Image (cartoon, grey):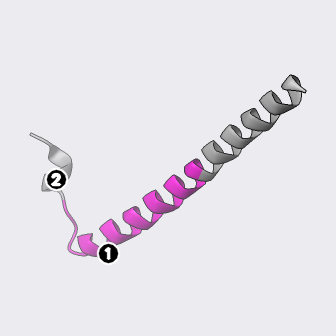
Amino acid sequence: MNNRNQRRSPGHGQDQQTIEQIRKSRNRVLALGLAAFVILVFFISIAKMS
C-alpha cells in the first residue's frame, strides 16, 4: 500500500494546487533550457560547416 495517499491534510486541495504550479514552472524552465541547447547545437553545427 502507498502510505502517502493515506496521510492527507484537510487543506490538501490547496497543497495539490501549489505542487502543480511548481511542476509547471519546473517544466517550463526545463523546456526552455532544452530548446536553448538544441539551438546552440544547431548554430555550432552551421558554423562548423562553413
> Which residue carries the number 1 mark?
14
Q: How many marks?
A: 2
Where is residue 32? Give x, y as percent.
62, 52
Neighbourhood count class around disc 2 (C-alpha, 10 Å): few under 14, some 14–19, many 20 upward: few
Q: Which quadrant is the N terminus positioned in? A: top left
Answer with the quarter of the image where residue 15 lies. bottom left
Q: Residue furthest front?
A: 50
32 within the magenta span: no
Amino acid, disc 1:
Gln
Which of these two is toward me, 17 or 46? 46
Neighbourhood count class around disc 1 (C-alpha, 10 Å): few under 14, some 14–19, many 20 upward: few
Q: Which residues are magenta?
A: 8-31
19 within the magenta span: yes
Disc on res. 38: none
Where is residue 18? Give x, y as percent.
40, 69
Compared to residue 28, the image places residue 30 above or below, namely: above
Which of these two is toward me, 29 or 18? 29
Would residue 22 appear left or right of 20 to someone viewing this image?
A: right
Where is residue 41? Give x, y as percent.
74, 33
Between the residue at mark 2 and the residue at mark 1, the CA separation in whole angstroms equals 16 Å
Q: Residue at x 69, y 39 (%)?
A: 37
Q: Residue at x 35, y 71 (%)?
A: 17
Q: Residue at x 54, y 57 (%)?
A: 28
> Which residue carries the number 2 mark?
5
Mark sitting earlier along the chain (2/1): 2
Amino acid, disc 2:
Asn
Q: Residue furthest top?
A: 49
Q: Residue at x 20, y 74 (%)?
A: 10
- Our reading of the magenta stretch's main secondary structure is helix
Would residue 5 appear left or right of 49 to someone viewing this image?
A: left
Q: Which quadrant is the C terminus positioned in? A: top right
Element marked by disc 2: helix
